[in-house]
Amino acid sequence: MSSAGQPRVTVITPAYNVGRYIGQAMDSVLAQSFPDFEYLVVDDGSTDNTADEVGRRASADPRVRPLSTDHAGACHARNVAIKQASGEFIAFLDGDDRWHPRFLHEQLALIESAGPDVAAVFARSRVMSESGRVYLLRWQRAKRYDFDDMLINSCPPRSGSSLLIRKEAFDAAGLFDEDLESAQDLDMWLRIQHGSGMPYFLGSRKYLLDIRVRAGAISRDHQKRFIALDKVIADHAPKLRRRPIGMAYVRAAVFAYRAGEDEFAARWSVAASEAGLRRLLADQHGRKVLGWSILPHRGRAMLRQASGLLRSAIGVIAGAGASIPR
C-alpha cells in the first residue's frame, strides 16, 4: 500500500452479463505484477452468472470489492465506482477484455516519467475473437496527444481498457456523460484535456491489452454510435486550437461511409470540406473521404461488400488460428 495507507491504483470493471468472460478479465487483474491496487467490480444488473464469478474471486482476494447497481449502462457503473475510488490513479478494464500481467507496472512507470501535464497514458492493444484467439494488432503512435489530436484522430486510445488516468483528472473534469449512448470515452477524454489543467495523453509503444470482439457489443451499433458521435463532435469541434473545425468530421465521415450510413456520411463530408481541399488531400483519411464521396451509390455498395467479405475471412482465420504469443 502507499505511504498514506491507500492503494496506489483503483481498477474498475463494469460488468453486465459477461459471466462467460469476467473470470478471465478479473484473473488478468489479480495476476498483475504490481500489487498495490483496489479492484471495484460493478455488476450492472446482470441476469446471468456474472455476480457468482465476481463473488468467488472476491472471497479469495481482499483487494476485490464487488458493487452492484440496477442496469443503467457501463458509464453509470464506472461513475458509481469512480465516486468510491481511493487510488491516486484509475484504470478501467471491461468485463470481456484482459490485461498483460505487467499492464499496471508499465503504465505507472510511463505516467510517472511523463510530467504533471499528462492526465493519462494508454497502451497499444491486440484484438481477440470471442474464443480468446488474438488475430490483430492495433497500432498508434507512441507520443503525446493534445485535444486536437484526440478529436481529429477519433480517440487514439481506442478502448477505455487501455488507459491509466490520474484520479484528479475526474475531480476536475467530472464524470462520464450517462446521457450519451455511445462515444462516452471520447467525450470524457476531451473534457479532461480541455478542463483538468492536464492537456496531454501519452501513448505507449507496448501491447498490454487484449480487446475481445463479440457480437452485440454496443460499439457495433452503428446508428447509436453515429448519433452520439454527431453530438460529441458538434460540442467539442469549436474548441480546436491548431486545426480547422472541418477536420473533426473527416474520420467520422469515413466510418459512416464504411458502415453504409450515407446520411451521416454525406453531411459529415460537407462539414469536412470546410477544411479545404489542400488539407484533405494531405491527410490519409481526408483522401478516403474524397474517394468515398465521388463513388456512385452502387460503387460504395460494392466496396462495402468486398470489405465485409474480407472481415469475414479474417474472422474465420481468427477462429481457427493460434494466438500470437505475448
Image (cartoon, helix red, strand yellow):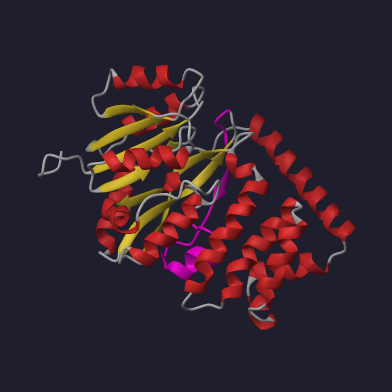
Q: Where is residue 156? Give x, y as percent.
A: 50, 58
In the picture, measured across the screen, residue 37 lies left or right of residue 217, that is left
Note whether 238 is above or below 136 in the view shown.
below
Q: Which residues are magenta?
A: 131-157
Note whether 2 is above or below 267 in the view shown.
above
Note whether 180 is above or below 230 in the view shown.
above
Q: Is residue 227 visible?
A: yes
Along the viewing direction, whichever of 190 and 120 lies nearer the viewer? 190
Quadrant showing the C terminus: top left
Quarter of the view holding residue 69? top left
Which residue is rendered at x = 62% and y = 67% of the image? 249
Which residue is rendered at x = 28% and y = 17% of the image? 59
Which residue is rendered at x = 72% and y = 51% of the image? 259
Quadrant showing the N terminus: top left
Any magenta on residue 152?
A: yes
In the picture, measured across the screen, residue 55 lies left or right of residue 149, that is left
Along the viewing direction, whichever of 292 and 326 lies nearer the viewer? 292
Note whether 288 is above or below 40 in the view shown.
below
In the picture, measured across the screen, residue 174 lies left or right of residue 134, that is left
Q: Where is residue 223? Give x, y as percent.
A: 67, 48
Q: Where is residue 113? Give x, y as percent.
A: 26, 60
Q: Where is residue 248? Give x, y as percent.
A: 58, 68
Which residue is rendered at x = 33% and y = 52% of the image? 165
Q: How many numbered marks appear? A: 0
Any magenta on residue 244?
A: no
Q: Is residue 99 visible?
A: no
